[in-house]
Image: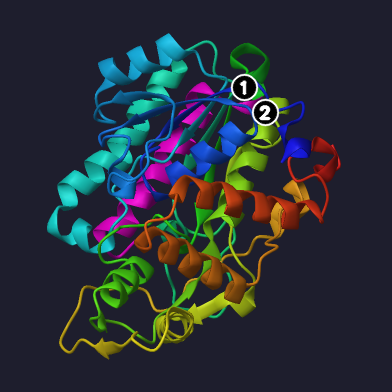
C-alpha cells in the first residue's frame, strides 16, 4: 500500500456523504490507508452498516442530506478538498413503497449537497455517485454510453436520472468549464452497476439476501432469476471514483461530466448464475427457491460502455468475477466466524491494490497520460 499512499492523496481532506453505507465504509478505509483525512456525513450511526461490528475512526456528522444548515456546517467546519456524494435511497423496492422519499433523498439531496459546495471555497472536486439505472432502459444488447438518453420507468431509476439532471444543471449554471478559472471546481457523476463485496447488509439485494439465508440454514428466495446485471467487485468501482476525483482536482476543465464504471461483457451474468457460484463457494448447506407471483418492474438487461473511463482515466476492471465472488464469500465467512473484520477489510484492500498495481500505479496521473 505504501506506493499508493504517495503524493496525491496524502493529507487530502475528503468529505464523503453516505460513509456508513456498504460502499462508504470501503471507500473510507481505503482513503485512510492512502493517508487522506476523511470526514463523513450520514443519517446512520458510524457502525450501522456493519451491524455494530466496526466503527471507522473518522469525524462523523449525523444529519439528513436535505438539511442544508447541517450539511453546510459540516463542510464549512471540515473545509474538504474533495467531496464524494454517495448518500442516497438505493433500493428499487423501497422506491415503490416510498417514491416521494426516494425522490427527495436522491434528487433534492443532491441539489442540497451541490448548493453547499457552491458556498464552500475549499472544494476543488465533486464526484456524485448515481447508477447504471439512470439510463432509459431499452432492454437491448448494446452497452449504454454516457451520451445515451436518461430516464426511468420506475421511481428508483427515475430518481437517479433526476440526480444526473441536477448535476448537469449545477455544473452548467455554477461550475461551467468556461468559468473554471473563477470557481475552480470540477463536478462529475459516476455510474456503476451491481456491486459485490463484504459488508453489504441491504435488504432485497441478491448477495446479502443469499448470505443471510445461507448463514441461517434457509433457502434464499429468488424473484427474478433470469435478470442479467453487470456484476463487479466494490473496489473496482471505488478505484474508478478515486481516479476520477483525482483527475477532477488536477484538471477540472477536462474531466467534468458523466462516467461509466462497469465490467466487461463476460461479467454481465444472470441472477441464477451468481446464486450458483456463491452457493458453491458457501458450501453444501446453501439452497435456493424461486418466488412465484408478480413482482415490481425491473429491467432485464443492463450493460455499460466504459470506453471513456478506459481511454481518459486508464480505468479497466482487473479482478475476475469468480475471484470477486470468492472474496465476497470469504469476507462473510470471517464475519460470521467472529474474526476481526477490520483486518479482513485491510487484507482485501491490500490484495486488490497489489493486483491493480500490476497494471501500473493505479492512482498516479501518469496512468492517464496527462
Closer-to-camera residue (224/10): 10
Asked which secondary structure carries label 2, the reply is loop
> CB atoms at circles 2 and 1 under 8 Å apart?
yes
- Residue 259 in the magenta stretch? The answer is no
Residue 259 visible in the current orientation: no
Vertical placement of 40 versus 137: above or below?
A: above
Say whether residue 16 is left or right of residue 74.
right
Q: CA distance from mark 2 to mark 1?
A: 5 Å
Vertical placement of 16 versus 271: above or below?
A: above
Residue 254, picture quadrant: top right
**x, y (%) of residue 229?**
47, 73
Name the residue: 85% across, 39% down.
366
**Main secondary structure found in the magenta portion:** helix
Say whether residue 365 is left or right of residue 321.
right
The segment highlighted magenta reads 152-177
Q: Which residue is mark 2?
A: 9
**x, y (%) of residue 20?**
36, 40
Residue 205, picture quadrant: bottom left
Q: Which residue is mark 1?
A: 12
Amino acid at each position: 500500500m505504501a506506493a499508493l499512499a504517495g503524493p496525491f492523496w496524502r493529507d487530502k481532506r475528503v468529505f464523503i456523504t453516505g460513509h456508513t453505507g456498504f460502499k462508504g465504509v470501503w471507500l473510507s478505509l481505503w482513503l485512510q490507508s492512502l493517508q487522506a483525512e476523511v470526514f463523513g456525513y450520514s443519517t446512520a450511526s458510524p457502525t450501522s452498516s456493519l451491524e455494530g461490528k466496526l466503527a471507522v475512526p473518522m469525524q462523523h456528522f449525523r444529519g439528513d442530506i436535505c438539511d442544508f444548515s447541517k450539511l453546510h456546517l459540516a463542510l464549512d467546519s471540515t473545509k474538504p478538498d474533495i467531496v464524494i456524494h454517495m448518500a442516497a435511497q438505493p433500493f428499487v423496492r423501497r422506491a415503490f413503497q416510498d417514491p416521494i422519499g426516494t425522490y427527495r433523498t436522491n434528487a433534492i439531496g443532491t441539489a442540497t449537497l451541490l448548493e453547499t459546495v457552491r458556498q464552500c471555497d475549499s472544494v476543488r472536486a465533486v464526484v456524485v455517485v448515481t447508477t447504471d439505472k439512470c439510463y432509459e432502459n431499452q432492454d437491448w444488447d448494446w452497452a449504454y454510453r454516457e451520451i445515451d438518453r436518461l430516464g426511468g420507468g420506475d421511481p428508483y431509476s427515475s430518481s437517479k436520472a433526476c440526480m444526473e439532471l441536477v448535476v448537469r444543471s449545477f455544473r452548467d449554471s455554477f461550475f461551467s468549464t468556461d468559468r473554471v478559472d473563477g470557481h475552480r471546481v470540477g463536478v462529475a457523476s459516476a455510474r456503476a452497476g451491481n456491486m459485490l463485496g463484504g459488508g453489504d447488509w441491504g435488504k432485497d439485494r441478491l448477495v446479502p439476501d443469499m448470505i443471510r439465508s445461507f448463514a441461517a440454514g434457509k433457502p434464499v428466495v429468488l424473484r427474478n432469476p433470469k435478470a442479467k446485471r453487470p456484476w463487479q467487485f466494490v473496489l473496482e468501482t471505488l478505484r474508478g471514483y478515486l481516479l476520477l476525483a483525482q483527475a477532477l482536482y488536477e484538471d477540472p476543465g477536462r474531466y467534468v461530466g458523466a462516467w461509466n464504471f462497469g465490467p466487461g461483457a463476460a461479467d454481465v451474468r444472470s441472477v441464477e448464475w451468481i446464486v450458483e457460484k456463491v452457493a458453491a463457494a458457501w458450501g453444501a448447506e446453501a439452497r435456493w427457491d424461486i418466488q412465484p407471483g408478480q413482482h415490481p418492474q425491473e429491467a432485464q438487461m443492463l450493460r455499460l460502455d466504459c470506453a471513456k473511463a478506459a481511454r481518459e482515466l486508464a480505468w479497466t476492471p482487473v479482478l475476475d468475477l469468480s475471484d470477486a465472488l470468492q472474496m465476497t464469500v470469504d469476507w462473510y465467512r470471517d464475519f460470521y466466524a467472529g474474526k476481526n473484520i477490520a483486518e479482513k477489510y485491510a487484507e482485501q484492500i491490500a490484495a486488490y491494490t497489489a493486483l491493480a498495481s500490476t497494471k501500473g500505479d493505479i492512482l498516479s496521473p501518469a496512468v492517464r497520460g496527462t
